[in-house]
Image (cartoon, helix red, strand yellow):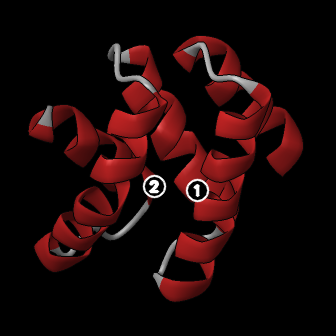
Amino acid sequence: DFEQQMARVGAIAGSSKSDLKSLSDQAVDLGAKTSLSASEVAKGMEELAALGMNTNQIMKAMPGVISAAEASGFSNNCDYYGFIFKLV
């Protein structure tokens, strides 16, 4: 579920309540504007948080990460998440 996914992102990244709202809003927005769903964007955010990025770093990175992954022609979620690890 999207809300649970975002709660994990916030917990790992140490996000405040307002930061978590901003992350959630961005995930929904990117989910509407890209080939990924909001839940898939949230999973990518979680991966970045697990790599040590804070809220601001995640929010700055996600649009570019998704654009680069789409340009590389990823074909499934495994490709997308693997692409994140290669970028960072």
Please name the amino acid that badge 1 sits on: Glu
> Does 37 appear above or below 48?
below
Q: Residue furthest front?
A: 18
**Dot label at residue 77:** 2
Please name the amino acid that badge 2 sits on: Asn
**Left or right, residue 2 beside residue 71:** right
**At which x and y percent is residue 26?**
58, 62
Residue displayed at 62% across by 83% down: 32
**At which x and y percent is residue 19?**
64, 36
Residue displayed at 61% across by 75% down: 29
**Left or right, residue 64 beside residue 86:** right
**At which x and y percent is residue 15?**
63, 22
Q: Is residue 6 visible?
A: yes
> Does 85 appear above or below 35?
above
**Residue placed under numbered mark 1 in the picture:** 40
**Left or right, residue 52 beside residue 9:** left
The 10 Å Cα crowd at callout 2, few under 14, some 14 to 19, many 20 or more, is few
The 10 Å Cα crowd at callout 1, few under 14, some 14 to 19, many 20 or more, is many
**Quarter of the C terminus within the rendering:** top left
**Dot label at residue 1:** none
Residue displayed at 51% across by 86% down: 33
Circles 1 and 2, Cβ within 8 Å, touching? The answer is yes
Residue displayed at 16% across by 66% down: 68
SS for dot 1: helix
SS for dot 2: helix
